[in-house]
Amino acid sequence: MPREIIAILRGVRPEEAQLIGRGLVDAGISIIEVPMNSPKALESIKILSDTLQGEAQIGAGTVLNVTQVHDVTVAGGQLIVSPDTVPDVIAATKDAGLASYPGVATPSECFTALRSGADGLKLFPSFLIGPDGLSAISSVLPGGTKTYAVGGVGPDNFVDWMHAGVSGFGIGSSLYKAGFSVNDVELKAKAIVSAYDSSLIATDQSGKIS
């Protein structure tokens, strides 16, 4: 069962993308996001999509408009992650056959995203919402809604978020920053995966995360 950990590679360069992607997959992370404000992001997405086909789900983050959705689709991306909720972006994503994860911070944004066809909700920035906020919002969301905490999450608070019912996590700077070596990223990824697995067992959430 794949772990619901999204590796956010903000700042990754095309020449390092393949090796870093391989390191993440070997460590147990199979969802990888390249934010669109990274250097030559589309080139990195294509490299990752081509070299990790069948092993990882590759996509783009910080997607702000329909044109970028088209560009990511051409590059071979499979998912679109945004910092905000824009119905046109969600619709274009679904029309292209990609998975949609828009950013939300309020119940209104959650329902707008879901009505527009979103596959899951990116709670951003999650440190402002907190596990208690997720618990409150989840009480009114449709059953089975997938939620991902992004921004201020990590091994230290995985358990708190899992107790609140979160589906997964987006991990950025604590996993990758521009200048990190492949070895750095792989070691951090292994530590994050280990903490995730331990937290999953501790909170008995195996039935909620798929």
Image (cartoon, rainbow, N blue to C red):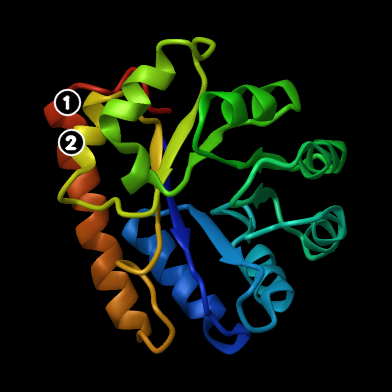
Q: Upstream in the sequence, badge 2 or badge 1?
A: 2
Compare residues 192 and 27 and report the one nearer the observer: 192
- Find residue 31 and report its horizontal and vertical position in percent: 50, 52
Q: Residue at x 73, y 57 (%)?
A: 64
Q: Residue at x 66, y 69 (%)?
A: 36
Q: Residues within 10 Å of mark 2 (few under 14, many from 20)?
A: many
Q: Please tell me in which quadrant of the rendered image residue 1 appears.
A: top left
Left or right, 161 with reference to 104? left
Residue at the image position 65 percent from the left and 75 percent from the top = 44
Residue beneath disc 1: 203
Secondary structure beneath disc 2? Answer: helix
Image quadrant in which you'd find residue 205: top left
The alpha-carbon separation of the residues under discs 2 and 1 comes to: 7 Å
Residue 82 spot, x, y in % from top left: 63, 51
83 with respect to 105 (left or right): right
In the image, 77 versus 64, the foreground residue is 64
Residues 150 and 18: in front is: 150
> Where does label 2 land, which residue?
159
Whether residue 125 sits left or right of residue 67 in the image: it is: left
Which residue occupies 84% across, 41% down?
A: 88
Q: Considering the image in quadrants, where does the C terminus appear?
A: top left
Amino acid type, label 1: Thr
Report if the CB atoms under discs 2 and 1 are less than 8 Å apart. yes
Image coordinates of residue 164 in percent, x first then y, are: 27, 25
